[in-house]
Amino acid sequence: MKSWDAVILGGGVIGLCCALELSKRERKVLVIERGEPGREASSAAAGMLANCDPHTPELLCSLANASAKLYPEFVHELQDESGVHIDFRREGTIAFFAAGESSEFGHPLSSEELSKLEPSLEAPGAAHFLPEASVDPRKLMEAIIKCLHRREIDLSSGAAVVEVEMTGRKVTAVRTEKSRYPTRVAINCAGAWAPRIAPVPFRTRPVKGQMLSVIPAPHQHFSLRHVVRHSSCYLVPRSDGRVVIGSTLEEAGYDKHVDPETIQALHQKAANLLPELGEGRILEAWSGLRPGTPDGLPLLGETSYGGYLAATGHYRNGILLAPITAHIIAKLVCAETPEFDILPFSAERFL
């Protein structure tokens, strides 16, 4: 019977990046995805690589900054291997902080500096420039999946994982609704669905986010070059002329219904910041389920079950943290010590 060195539970950006990193180390890997790879939270994201965000938990900052530094080479490798342009933009972010907020990165912008950077922006307060980047998550996932196929990494889709089988508290196989896959290593990257996999009820939950994208009206051209972040919404420009607008934060379970009134409200909030967006046409509206945790930190690392690891619960930072998470998981699987203290992210801290 065929077996694998590692089976990854979940085919989002975290799981697929872990698979690619393990394949570099000549591990035979299988990825199991309940639906279509990359089509849940990963493709629903805006793609901001917000490592300078003051809302990032302090314990997570070192990983966020390390992952941001990995991104240029990460993107270069993916684009070179897949032939897919990921739309990695390094124009920076213009952030309008709430009272009392600040970031150790970047610098304040005078009215004149802001006007030069974004002349059409209606400033709702003091502006700061942050040296952040962005990607198009859908293009990112397309590139990753093409690399997955090029490297002949095994992929099973369309059946949910129900259990990681153990013998004497050591992993022996992964069982789905349809099949059983022998392995000594299982990595739970199932995002908001992580708690549904026995025997460990990891504490993640779905946090719904509704979003939209806007395209210019005929004979119009959006002037926006930078990501714009405000408490009311954020704006993420794409190189093809679209602007992505987000996002809600809703405790709505696994409901992915898109509410037209909510979408219209987001569109109006965006137009308050950049009036030209009000004339744009809504191209698409969607929602995604971010994997949240009780303390806002991911579940990352080994468990008390031999061979069972977790890499889930990345909440709003899954795209940003994918390269560093894959690096850490690959080191653990290969019995190496990561350069980072991952104890605060203990996978079993809520059990």
Image: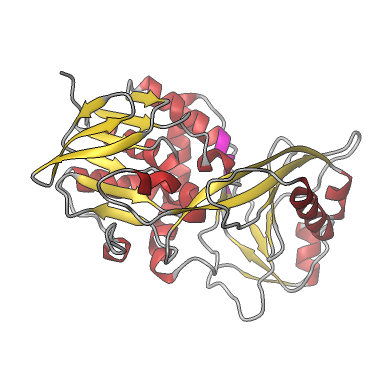
Q: Residue furthest left?
A: 168
Image quadrant where residue 340 sits = bottom left
Relative to residue 287, is residue 250 depicted above or below? below
Which range of residues does the magenta coloring cover? Answer: 134-138
Q: Residue furthest top?
A: 1
Question: In which quadrant will I find the N terminus?
Answer: top left
Magenta-drawn stretch contains 135: yes
Left-right relation of 95 to 13 = right
Magenta-drawn stretch contains 349: no
Left-right relation of 198 to 146 = left
Residue at 86% across, 49% down: 278
Q: Position of residue 285 (x, y in %)?
A: 71, 40
- Taking depth in this image into account, of 298 and 93 the one nearest to the observer is 298
Image quadrant where residue 229 sits = bottom right
Q: Residue furthest right?
A: 219
Q: Position of residue 335 (x, y in %)?
A: 15, 47
Q: Position of residue 331 (x, y in %)?
A: 23, 47
Residue at 64% across, 58% down: 93
Left-right relation of 224 to 247 = right
- Taking depth in this image into account, of 42 and 144 the one nearest to the observer is 42
Question: In which quadrant will I find the C terminus?
Answer: bottom left
Q: Total marks drawn? A: 0
Left-right relation of 224 to 163 = right
Residue at 8% across, 45% down: 168
Image quadrant where residue 14 sits = top left
Q: Position of residue 106 (x, y in %)?
A: 58, 67
- Taking depth in this image into account, of 271 and 313 the one nearest to the observer is 313
Relative to residue 327, is residue 270 depicted above or below? below
